[in-house]
Image (spheres, rainbow, N blue to C red):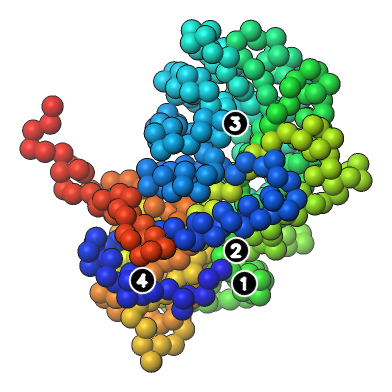
Amino acid sequence: MDPLNTMDHGLIEQLAGRYGLPLHVIFTDRIARNAGSFREVIGRIYENTLVCFAVKANPCRGAVRFASSLDIGLDAVSEFELQAGLEEGIDPDGIVCNGNAKSDRYIETAVGAGALIAADSDWELKLVSEASGRLKRRAPVLLRFAGMALEGLTASDQSTAVAWTKFGFPVDRAEEVIKQALAAADIDPVGISAHIGTQICDERGYDRLMEYLLDLGEHSLNLGMNLKYIDIGGGFPVSYLEHDEWLAFQARLLEQLDGRLPPERWVTWDNIPMGFREYAESNRAGGVTPQWKGKAYWSGYPGARMLEHLLERQTSTGRSVRDRLHELGSPTLIIEPGRALIGTAGVTAAKVSGVKEVSGNHVVVLELGIVNHGVMLVTADIFPVEVYPRLTSDRPVDAFLAGRLCFTGDMISKVKVRLNRLPRRGDLLIIHHTGAYAADHFASNSCGFPLPAKVAVHKDGAVEVWRRAERFEDVFGGTICS
């Protein structure tokens, strides 16, 4: 991850003065750099790979427009995301339409445009077939599967290929589903798909997923499918910590869960066990070996390195993934890097309201809360954070970050984060790596707060407003609503 001292703090302060606080800032040159890392791996190992920008990671026209300028594809999950991609000039051949509850409009638009549709259910296959018949255009379809043995790789709410998920066809129905799709008159089954989840730090998860998909691909060919695509989805990780920091955090949390730390030295809010939940629940009843399960915050294979590992690793057949793909006819491999493409490109700036003590712990209260830092309602995240201005008297301190919404769960970080100093009211707090999900995934107008501005800074220094800050009438409406 980028050292915090590389940030142009003066620019952030200038932008805050112009667009207000809180403020989300995206640096597009970092998106381009991340995309370039994936391109380098693809060019060297398996050229027939399509990188797609997941619009859900940063849903606004500006982000889609920049993705289009990089000549990458699009992963959409709604009719508006699809519309943005089409209007910003992304080739329909490079657009994958996902989602477990596609509306009629979404399906009609996708079929009409010729975008790839990741079919999620029996009824959806029927609806796509009917729309294709009406529009007299045979829709290209990917069959999305789930139910693989992929538990414990991320937070359960974010795991999208296991047995208990709302997405996809059960993998044990694969032969039936493939035959059903091949028999449909108005659709063209051209590939298979699965999405593993998000922030998958353990490379073994992708190894297992790829084994499933390669075997499914071979089975699809044997059943008569023209296998043009294998979509392995997204979830490529960002390392929010250095490895030694991640190990130290886990060791400290285990001390806490074992009762060896007083509350003022806890590293998680209210003794949350996070990835050690199973250990915390069973340890008193006889003990188990501590094993982190769920969303992690460091990976030995962040971003494009995960793709490199995946393509070069040996499968159970003794041949590499790359070689097995060629044996299947070299289908296009679709990847959706998600946060690995845009997450490290953003920062969030917020004003400090004040600092209080809770059970002996520092709690920094921010004028921020309309976002729960990407996935805060699901699981706590650990992001690099700093207080500005920096002072010669700065001394590192750990603190929890609290938001301003009127409910107890509004903790921007339920994990203690390291600050360069304890802030004062009015200071600027800058949270790094918030380019993906943080500005939108749980954004709301709760308590009447407006959504903040989102601006992009381009390599040449030009600033583009991707979303203006909401005003009173945007949240509460005018004096007369009709």
Q: Are marks 2 and 3 in contact (CB under 8 Å)?
A: no
Q: Quadrant of residue 169?
A: top right
Q: Name the residue carrying label 2.
A: 239
Q: CA distance from mark 4 to mark 2?
A: 21 Å
Q: CA distance from mark 1 to mark 4?
A: 21 Å
Residue 429, disc: 4
Please tell me which residue lies in front, 217 or 297. 217
Q: Is residue 341 left or right of residue 465?
A: right
- Point out the image quarter for the C terminus: top left
Instruction: Tell me which residue sits at (33%, 50%) in the image.
Output: 466
Type of amino acid under label 4: Leu
Q: Earlier in the sequence, mark 2 or mark 3?
A: 3
Instruction: Tell me which residue sits at (73%, 26%) in the image.
Output: 227
Q: Are marks 1 and 2 in contact (CB under 8 Å)?
A: yes
From the top left corner, tell me how far across and down residue 382 is, in percent.
Answer: 52, 64
Type of amino acid under label 1: Glu
Q: Is residue 464 left or right of residue 165?
A: left
Instruction: Tell me which residue sits at (47%, 43%) in the image.
Output: 68
Residue at the extreme bottom of the image, as rendered: 393
Q: Count residues near mark 2 (Cα–Cα under 10 Å), then give few for <14, some for 14-19, many for 20+.
A: many
Q: Name the residue carrying label 3.
A: 167
Q: Is residue 441 left or right of residue 309?
A: left
Instruction: Tell me which residue sits at (46%, 47%) in the image.
Output: 69
Q: Is residue 307 above or below residue 98?
A: below
Type of amino acid under label 2: Ser
Q: Count residues near mark 4 (Cα–Cα under 10 Å), then give few for <14, some for 14-19, many for 20+.
A: many
